[in-house]
Image: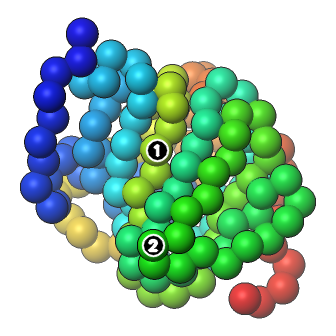
Amino acid sequence: MSTPIVRAGGDGQKRWFSGGGVHTWKATSEETDGAFLLFEDHMAEGKMTPLHTHPDADEAFYVLEGEIVVHVDGDEHKVGPGGFALAPRGVPHAFLVTSEGTRMLCLQSPGTGQAFFRQASDPTSDDSLDGPVDFARVQAAAKEHGGVEILGPPPFSTPH
């Protein structure tokens, strides 16, 4: 059963994600009875994800600061502060961070991908964006836990 959650800015479990960036988990799958996973993602300019899909979950991005380019189902869109993007389950997507210190909320519903994110990250108390990137670890977590299917390299070929 879900319980009420109230967290102040900066509160929540911080994790260095091996794909780059610091996640601050605002609501875990356990806390929402599996309904969703919500985390703030703080990233450096140049971070990009491989082309991937979430077969069993919708993924939404709400940009708080900075800018990203989202590649969704073959099309690219710039998304800045206050902007929103949704990749429905099964739709191929990726994103590229195009400004320093970008922060966005990431919502996955249902919260079935949490085991992937947990295995592909480590607890941290540091807000530095200069941690180690290890895509092999991200791929291994995807294979072991599902929640994400990596389809190929990042689809971005031109500067943004």
Q: Are marks 2 and 1 in contact (CB under 8 Å)?
A: no
Quadrant housing residue 22: bottom left
Coloring scheme used: rainbow
* Residue 160 in the image: above or below residue 110: below
Secondary structure type for disc 1: strand
Image quadrant containing the C terminus: bottom right
Characterize the local packing of mark 2: few (<14), some (14-19) or many (20 or more) Cα atoms within 10 angstroms: few
Q: Amino acid at mark 1?
A: Leu
**Residue 128, image x, y percentages:** 28, 73
**Residue 64, image x, y percentages:** 39, 71
* Residue 132 in the image: above or below residue 11: below
Q: Of the residues under marks 2 and 1, which one precedes in the sequence?
A: 2
The residue that appears at 46% across and 44% down in the rendered structure is 107
Quadrant housing residue 131: bottom left
* Residue 57 in the image: above or below residue 30: below
* Residue 126 in the image: above or below residue 120: below
Which label lies toward us, 2 or 1? 2
The residue that appears at 53% across and 79% down in the rendered structure is 80
Characterize the local packing of mark 1: few (<14), some (14-19) or many (20 or more) Cα atoms within 10 angstroms: many
Residue 10 or 109: which is nearer the viewer? 109
**Residue 105, image x, y percentages:** 41, 57
**Residue 137, image x, y percentages:** 56, 43
Image quadrant containing the N terminus: top left
Kindly identify which residue carries mark 1: 107
Residue 33 or 144: which is nearer the viewer? 33
Q: Is residue 104 visible?
A: yes
Q: Which mark is residue 98?
A: none
Q: Amino acid at mark 2?
A: Gly
Kindly identify which residue carries mark 2: 82
